Image (cartoon, grey):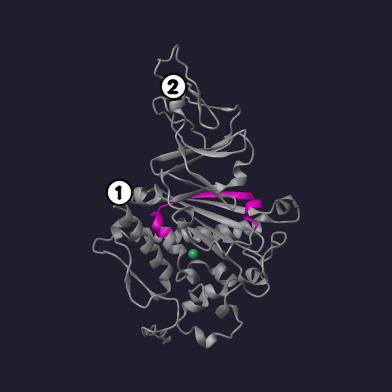
C-alpha cells in the first residue's frame, strides 16, 4: 500500500515565521457573485482608489488617446499638443453622449468632436464650439469644459482616480515600490499587450495571486524555474521549519531561480541584457513584485517588466490586461526572441486564469458560507483586511 503523506503539523502560537497562526475565515461566499455587493465594491474600491491605465509609452506623442472603462464609468485619456496628459469623463457636456467609442489611437485633428451634435472640444478639454445658430446670453462655453479626472504618472505608469478627492497617491501602493525602484520603468516601452476576460470575480484572481499553495499542480513549468514555489511557498520564512534550512543555498529553500536560469522565460535565458542599475541580489532574486490594489501588479525581472491590470467587468467577470515592458534597445535587436519571454508569462497567466475560474464555479454552493485561510495565505488575509477596511470607510 502506498504510504500516506503525514498530515501537516500543528503550529504553536509563538513560532517565528510569516504565516497565519490562526484559522481565519475567508470572505463571505456571496461577495463573489452578489450584484448588490459588487456595486458596493465598485463605489468603495474602484471609484475611490487610483487605478492603473497603461504604461505612458502607449500615449507617447501629441493627440494620442486611450479609452479606459471601469464599472459604469468611461474615461478618455489624451496627450495634448502641449505634451500634457489629461483624463476626462468620456461624456459630452451638451446632453451627455459618449464622446469616443474607440479603444485608442490618435486624433487626426486637434479636436475632440462629439458624434451626436458635433460640439467640439480642445484636447485640454475646453469647449470650442457648439453647432447651434445662436447661443443664449447666459450660456458661457467656459462652463462646459469636459469633466476632468485626477491623473498621475508614477515611474511611467499612468494612474487615474474616479474620486474628486482621491486618497494620497502612496496609499494605494500597497507593497513593493521600494523593491522595484532600481528598474528603469520610465524608459521602457510596451513590446506586447495581451487581454483576456476571466469568468471570475476580481477578488478571486487577486487571492490566487497572493498565494502559492496552488503552484505545484497549476504551474509545472514555473515551479521548475522557481524551485521554492514547488514547496507551495514564495518566501523562505513562509515555512515554520525554515530555520532548519537557514544556511542551505538550494533555491528550494533560499528562493531565486533554478541554476543556470536568468529570467522568467521558456529557456531561462535573458531577452537582451539585464538592466544596468540592478544589484546582484535583485538579479538573483528572479522576480520582484510591486502591487497597487485594486488594479495592478508589476513583476520585475532582470531584463523586462510585466504589468498585469485587473479590472472588474461584472460580479463574475474580470478583465486582465498585460503589458510586457522592454528596453527600446532590446526591441531593436533582431537576435532577441520575445516569444521566449512572452510565451512563458502567457502560459502562467492562462494557468492562473483557469484556476481562478475553477474557484469561482464552486462558490455558489448553497451552504458554503465562507472558506478558511491556512498559514501560507497571509497575503490573502492582508488583501481581505484591506478590502473590509475600504468597505467600512465608505459606509
Ligand atoms: S450630446 Fe454631444 S453634441 Fe449633443
Ligand atoms: Fe499562480
The alpha-carbon separation of the residues under discs 1 and 2 comes to 41 Å
Q: Mark 1 points at which residue?
A: 35
Name the N-terminal-most of marks 1 and 2.
1
Measured from the top left, where is residue 190 in percent x and y?
A: 62, 49
Measured from the top left, where is residue 89 in percent x and y?
A: 45, 36
Query: In this view, which residue lies farthest toward the top?
Result: 133
Q: Quadrant of the N terminus?
A: bottom left
Query: In this view, which residue lies farthest toward the left?
Result: 367
Tell me the crowding category of disc 2: few under 14, some 14 to 19, or many 20 or more residues within 10 angstroms, Cα based. few
Q: Is residue 140 visible?
A: yes
Q: Can residue 197 be seen in this view?
A: no
Observer-nearest of 201 and 69: 69
Per the image, label 1 sits on a secondary structure element best described as helix
With 24 as the anchor, is 216 left or right in this view?
Answer: right
Q: Over which residues does the magenta segment extend?
A: 184-205
Say whether residue 294 is magenta.
no
Q: Name the residue under label 2.
A: 140
**Residue 373's image quarter?**
bottom left
Q: Nearer the viewer, mark 1 or mark 2?
A: 2
Q: Which mark is residue 15?
A: none
Query: In this view, which residue lies farthest toward the front?
Result: 138
Measured from the top left, where is residue 103 in percent x and y?
A: 52, 38
Say whether residue 201 is magenta.
yes
Q: Reply above or below: 370 against 125.
A: below
Instruction: Please tell me in which quarter of the rendered image ligand 1 is found.
Output: top left
**Residue 107's image quarter?**
top right
Q: Reply above or below: 377 against 91.
A: below
Observer-nearest of 42 and 172: 172
Q: What's the residue at 28%, 49% (across, down)?
A: 36
Per the image, label 2 sits on a secondary structure element best described as loop
Q: What's the residue at 67%, 55% (across, down)?
A: 338
Tell me the crowding category of disc 1: few under 14, some 14 to 19, or many 20 or more residues within 10 angstroms, Cα based. some
Amino acid at each position: 500500500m502506498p504510504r500516506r503523506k503525514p498530515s501537516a503539523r500543528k503550529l504553536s502560537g509563538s513560532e517565528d515565521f510569516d504565516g497565519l497562526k490562526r484559522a481565519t475565515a475567508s470572505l463571505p461566499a456571496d461577495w463573489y457573485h452578489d450584484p448588490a455587493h459588487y456595486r458596493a465594491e465598485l463605489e468603495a474600491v474602484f471609484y475611490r482608489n487610483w487605478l492603473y491605465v497603461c504604461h505612458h509609452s502607449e500615449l507617447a506623442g501629441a493627440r494620442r488617446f486611450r479609452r479606459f472603462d471601469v464599472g459604469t464609468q468611461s474615461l478618455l485619456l489624451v496627450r495634448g499638443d502641449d505634451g500634457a496628459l489629461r483624463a476626462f469623463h468620456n461624456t459630452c457636456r451638451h446632453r451627455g453622449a459618449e464622446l469616443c467609442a474607440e479603444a485608442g489611437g490618435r486624433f487626426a485633428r486637434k479636436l475632440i468632436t462629439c458624434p451626436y451634435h458635433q460640439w467640439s472640444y480642445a484636447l485640454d478639454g475646453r469647449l470650442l464650439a457648439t453647432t447651434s445658430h445662436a447661443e443664449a446670453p447666459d450660456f458661457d462655453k467656459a462652463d462646459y469644459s469636459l469633466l476632468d479626472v485626477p491623473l498621475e504618472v508614477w515611474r511611467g505608469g499612468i494612474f487615474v482616480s474616479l474620486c474628486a478627492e482621491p486618497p494620497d497617491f502612496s496609499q494605494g501602493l500597497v507593497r513593493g515600490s521600494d523593491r522595484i525602484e532600481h528598474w528603469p520603468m520610465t524608459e521602457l516601452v510596451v513590446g506586447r499587450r495581451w487581454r483576456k476576460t476571466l469568468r471570475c470575480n476580481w477578488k478571486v484572481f487577486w487571492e490566487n495571486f497572493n498565494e502559492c499553495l496552488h503552484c505545484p499542480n497549476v504551474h509545472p513549468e514555473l515551479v521548475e524555474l522557481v524551485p521554492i514555489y514547488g514547496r507551495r511557498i514564495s518566501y523562505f520564512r513562509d515555512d515554520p521549519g525554515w530555520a532548519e534550512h537557514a544556511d542551505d543555498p538550494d533555491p528550494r529553500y533560499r528562493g531565486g531561480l533554478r541554476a543556470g536560469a536568468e529570467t522568467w522565460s521558456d529557456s531561462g535565458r535573458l531577452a537582451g541584457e539585464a538592466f544596468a542599475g540592478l544589484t546582484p541580489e535583485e538579479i538573483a532574486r528572479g522576480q520582484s513584485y510591486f502591487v497597487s490594489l485594486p488594479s495592478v501588479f508589476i513583476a520585475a525581472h532582470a531584463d523586462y517588466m510585466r504589468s498585469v491590470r485587473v479590472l472588474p467587468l461584472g460580479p463574475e467577470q474580470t478583465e486582465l490586461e498585460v503589458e510586457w515592458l522592454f528596453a527600446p534597445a532590446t526591441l531593436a535587436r533582431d537576435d532577441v526572441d520575445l516569444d521566449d519571454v512572452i510565451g512563458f508569462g502567457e502560459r502562467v497567466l492562462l494557468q492562473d486564469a483557469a484556476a481562478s475560474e475553477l474557484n469561482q464555479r464552486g462558490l455558489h454552493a448553497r451552504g458554503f458560507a465562507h472558506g478558511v485561510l491556512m498559514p501560507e495565505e497571509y497575503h490573502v488575509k492582508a488583501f481581505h483586511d484591506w478590502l473590509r477596511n475600504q468597505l467600512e470607510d465608505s459606509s
